[in-house]
């Protein structure tokens, strides 16, 4: 379906059209009456609001104390409206919003500036897209800054996480809004793979008939994580902190900082000749296909292709993505997936 040309409409013009019920603005709307917002028509009776502040959880009395410019300054345009994909030299990216605000962000640097390393990251935000956007933009830069003095990749990653956490907490307190994100990034130093993770995104190495999880889930199904939170006084209801937050580690979420850790779990993996694929993805994908199911689907795909035919990474990525989307839980969540062909990567180092 072709998308009509973008147009600017004032709030008064927009709200005057009662026959457009799909247009929904957030609690900041009353403060923006005199401003312009960018609205794109995406159906006969629906619009996508492109340039407006993210929804907040503040009460009307609190929000009324903030002027329009402060709300407006929180606006971050999403990377995608619906779906995005990209084929790199040895990796394939695919994202889908499933009609929701896209709160997943990712960062891919096949060759980082100033250092001979490759970097991949996925960040799954909650409450707004502001926090994952900032983390995706800055975490790798802080890592490189630390690496110049540390000369130790795990320590440089830990310090980068600490710095971005301090920045995010200061930002959220100043703006009086909430938000947080998972953070999963992996650094390739030739055959050595370093992963820093907090939250429920995952990275998995797939071999011919087996797989290796390079990250663990930081949620309340993880007994060690649950025990740590409860020892700090956190109340867990229905596998959520205070019945709300499903994560035991995150960046941001200053409301729960006395319970939540922002320290990443660091793992290392030496690439082997029988490693075939590495997949980094947010929980939207893994809720559809877990590691074992993904391995089975990779085997199924290779059998369909035949041994003589060179495997097409784009086709594999889309096949896995489509299979994950068949799960009803996945259909309700943002999904971001990076599939890396290990053999193609090794040919470039």
Image: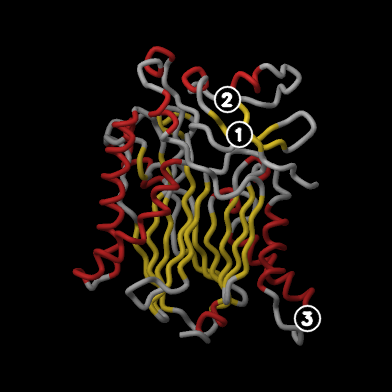
| Residue drawn where x is 29% and y is 31% of the image | 174
**Residue 21: horizontal and vertical position, in percent?**
71, 22
| Residue drawn where x is 68% and y is 69% of the image | 314
- Whether the residues at callouts 1 and 3 have beta carbons within 8 Å, the answer is no
**Residue 304: horizontal and vertical position, in percent?**
79, 74
Residue lying farthest left?
149
Q: Circle 1 sits in a helix, a strand or a loop, which is it?
A: strand
Real-space CA distance between mark 1 and mark 3, rounded to the nearest whole angstrom: 46 Å
Residue at mark 2: 25
As drawn, the label of residue 49 is 1
Q: Circle 2 sits in a helix, a strand or a loop, which is it?
A: loop
Is 255 located above or below residue 218 in the figure?
above
The residue nearer to you, when weighing 274 against 83, is 83
Label 3 crowd bin: few (<14), some (14–19), many (20+), radius 10 Å: few
Is 205 located above or below residue 72 in the figure?
below
Lateral position of residue 221 relative to residue 334, left or right: left
**Residue 134: horizontal and vertical position, in percent?**
40, 48
The residue nearer to you, when weighing 298 against 338, is 338
Real-space CA distance between mark 3 and mark 2, rounded to the nearest whole angstrom: 51 Å
- Whether the residues at callouts 3 and 2 have beta carbons within 8 Å, the answer is no
Which comes before the other along the chain, label 3 or label 2?
2
Label 2 crowd bin: few (<14), some (14–19), many (20+), radius 10 Å: some
- Whether the residues at callouts 2 and 1 have beta carbons within 8 Å, the answer is yes
Residue at mark 3: 306
Which comes before the other along the chain, label 2 or label 1?
2
Number of marks in picture: 3
Label 1 crowd bin: few (<14), some (14–19), many (20+), radius 10 Å: some
Mark nearest the camera among 1 and 3 is 1
| Residue drawn where x is 53% and y is 24% of the image | 26
Which comes before the other along the chain, label 1 or label 3?
1
**Residue 222: horizontal and vertical position, in percent?**
43, 47
């Amino acid at each position: 379906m072709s998308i009509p040309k973008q147009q600017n409409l004032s709030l008064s013009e927009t709200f005057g059209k009662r026959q457009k019920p799909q247009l929904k603005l957030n609690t900041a709307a009353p403060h923006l009456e005199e401003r312009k917002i960018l609205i794109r028509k995406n159906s006969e009776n629906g619009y996508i609001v492109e340039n407006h502040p993210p929804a907040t959880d503040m009460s009307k009395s609190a929000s009324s104390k903030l002027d329009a410019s402060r709300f407006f300054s929180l606006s971050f345009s999403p990377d995608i409206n619906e779906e995005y994909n990209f084929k790199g030299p040895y990796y394939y990216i695919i994202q889908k919003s499933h009609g929701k605000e896209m709160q997943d962000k990712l960062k891919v640097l096949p060759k980082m500036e100033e250092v001979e390393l490759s970097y991949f990251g996925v960040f799954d935000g909650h409450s707004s897209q502001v926090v994952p956007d900032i983390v995706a933009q800055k975490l790798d830069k802080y890592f490189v800054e630390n690496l110049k003095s540390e000369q130790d990749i795990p320590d440089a990653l830990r310090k980068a996480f600490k710095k971005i956490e301090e920045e995010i907490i200061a930002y959220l307190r100043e703006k009086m809004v909430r938000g947080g994100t998972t953070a999963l990034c992996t650094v390739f130093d030739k055959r050595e793979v370093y992963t820093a993770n907090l939250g429920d995104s995952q990275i998995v190495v797939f071999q011919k008939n087996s797989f290796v999880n390079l990250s663990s889930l930081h949620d309340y199904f993880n007994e060690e994580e649950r025990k740590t939170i409860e020892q700090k006084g956190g109340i867990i209801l229905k596998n959520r902190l205070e019945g709300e937050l499903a994560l035991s580690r995150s960046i941001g979420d200053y409301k729960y900082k006395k319970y939540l850790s922002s320290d990443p779990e660091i793992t290392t993996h030496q690439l082997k000749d029988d490693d075939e694929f590495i997949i980094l993805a947010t929980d939207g994908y893994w809720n559809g296909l877990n590691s074992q199911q993904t391995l089975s689907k990779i085997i199924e795909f290779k059998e369909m292709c035949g041994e003589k035919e060179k495997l097409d990474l784009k086709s594999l990525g889309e096949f896995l993505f489509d299979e994950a989307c068949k799960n009803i839980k996945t259909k309700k969540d943002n999904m971001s997936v990076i599939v890396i062909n290990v053999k193609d990567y090794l040919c470039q180092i």
